[in-house]
Image (cartoon, rainbow, N blue to C red):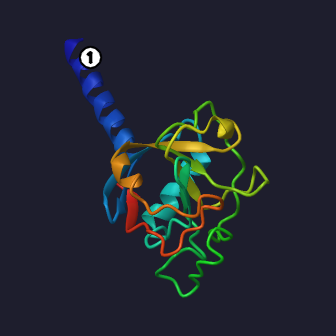
């Protein structure tokens, strides 16, 4: 009986460790590495899409096109915001997405606090696609209005260094970009 108990504990710890590792992402910025924990139990479709785009390299080179000091940094326009692409157009960055269909909202009880990742979208709650933002500070007015799906757990000081945009619109000239984003 003792062997079975130890075997069960060992197996459970392996599975738990593997699941945790599969939900950690590494975002490389010019300033340093950022570790992000994803919440598939809260927003499974957003997490799946985020990982799919990240692990296929779609986010590499994408600019932070809208950054408002004290609020958030927005990125993820893989169509017009990818500085490595022939379709890159800073004037259009923020209007594109991926070739995949839009996602239905997955509003959760996750509060939009410092470091939270959430899906950017238009006025239509079911229009999230590839874009996302990272909160610099708490933004309770976004709670249950946007699909939060992860949180920065290490390296938020590097996110804080992302070049800020116009205080009114957030538009950034010569923006910082994602060097790479992938599963750990």
Residue under label 1: 5
Q: Residue furthest right?
A: 124
Query: Which percent across, then down, holds residue 159?
Result: 41, 53
Query: Which percent across, then down, holds residue 155?
Result: 33, 48
Q: Secondary structure at mark 1?
A: helix
Disc 1 packing (10 Å; few <14; some 14–19; many ≥20)? few
Asked whether the viewer can see residue 107, the reply is no
Picture quadrant of residue 138? top right
- Residue drawn at (48%, 39%), measured in percent from left and top? 114
- Residue drawn at (75%, 52%), measured in percent from left and top? 126
- Residue drawn at (44%, 68%), measured in percent from left and top? 176
Picture quadrant of residue 161? bottom left
Asked whether the viewer can see residue 15, the reply is yes
In this view, the residue in front, 101 or 94, is 94
Identify the image quadrant of the N terminus: top left
Picture quadrant of residue 93? bottom right
């Amino acid at each position: 009986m003792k062997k079975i108990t130890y075997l069960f504990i060992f197996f459970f710890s392996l599975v738990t460790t593997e699941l945790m590792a599969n939900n950690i992402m590494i975002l490389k910025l010019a300033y340093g590495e950022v570790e992000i924990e994803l919440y598939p139990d809260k927003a499974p479709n957003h997490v799946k899409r985020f990982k799919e785009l990240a692990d296929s390299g779609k986010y590499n080179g994408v600019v932070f096109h809208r950054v408002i000091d004290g609020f958030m940094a927005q990125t993820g326009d893989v169509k017009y915001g990818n500085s490595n692409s022939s379709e890159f157009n800073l004037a259009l960055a923020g209007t594109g997405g991926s070739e995949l269909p839009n996602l239905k909202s997955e509003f959760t009880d996750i509060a939009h606090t410092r470091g939270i990742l959430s899906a950017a979208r238009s006025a239509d709650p079911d229009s999230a696609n590839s874009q996302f933002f990272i909160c610099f500070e708490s933004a309770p007015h976004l709670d249950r209005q946007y699909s939060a799906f992860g949180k920065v757990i290490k390296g938020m000081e590097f996110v804080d260094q992302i070049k800020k945009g116009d205080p009114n619109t957030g538009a950034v000239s010569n923006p910082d970009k994602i060097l790479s984003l992938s599963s750990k």
